[in-house]
Amino acid sequence: MNMQEKRYPYKPKKWLGPVIFVMFLGMSYPLGLMAYNKETGINFFNIIILPAEYAAIIFGLFCVLFIILSLLGILIFKASLASDRYIVLSEEGIQAPKTGISNQIKCVSWEKIEYISLQQVSSQVFFQVHHDQGKLTINSTLFPQYQDFEEAVNFITEHLSIDPSSPA
């Protein structure tokens, strides 16, 4: 079988990282102030009642958590600027980044694919390639356009001659 190699850019949108960074950093600021001032207690439906001293610890932990999540926004932005993340469909099989922000490339040969499935969560569609060493998940939102995702899925299903969501 002679087939031409197909390459699809596979990375997060450029605007996503800065939005995540600003959002979580903005949420960490008031929590940090409440932890620092130690003036606000917690009364959660009269089930959980904490005085200001203990509530400051909880606010501080959430502040640190949101700061860590804002750093994830920087990582996503860095991944969106990388130009070397592609999904490659070739004679050997599928080569794709392990995740949208990973530098690790997973290679799955056509013979090792056991079955494929499609899963939709809200507006995101996940194409899952189950193989003998695990699962490769391809996310529709990491393609430049949804039509590229559909083209890649159609190419894989035609090459394997099986329908998504049906075990081989």
Image (cartoon, rainbow, N blue to C red):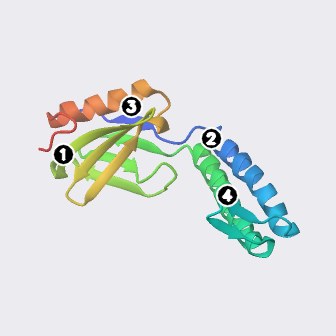
Quick one: label 2 or label 1, which is nearer the N terminus? 2
Residue identified by numbered label 2: 16
Q: Which mark is residue 71?
A: 4
User: Where is 46 relative to 109, above or below?
Assistant: below
| Residue at 27 percent of width and 29 percent of height | 154
Identity of the residue drawn at 67% across and 58% down: 71
Looking at the rendered structure, the secondary structure element under dot 1 is strand
Instruction: Identify the mark nearer the N-term, 3 or 2.
Output: 2
Spatial CA span between label 3 and label 1: 18 Å
**Residue 7 place in picture, x, y as percent:** 39, 36
Q: Residue 68 placed where, x, y %?
A: 66, 62
Image quadrant in which the C terminus is located: top left
Instruction: Give the Cα distance between marks 4 and 1.
Output: 36 Å
Q: Give above or below for 154 relative to 119.
A: above
The residue wearing badge 1 is: 115
- Mark 3 or 2, which is nearer the eye? 2
Per the image, the residue denoted by label 3 is: 149
Callout 2, which amino acid? Leu
Mark 1 residue type: Tyr
Residue 140 placement, left or right of 119: right
SS at mark 2?
helix
The answer to which of marks 4 and 3 sits earlier in the sequence is 4
Residue found 16% across the figure and 39% down from its top: 166
The span from disc 4 to disc 3 (Cα, nearest Å) is 28 Å
- Residue 2 can be seen in this image: no
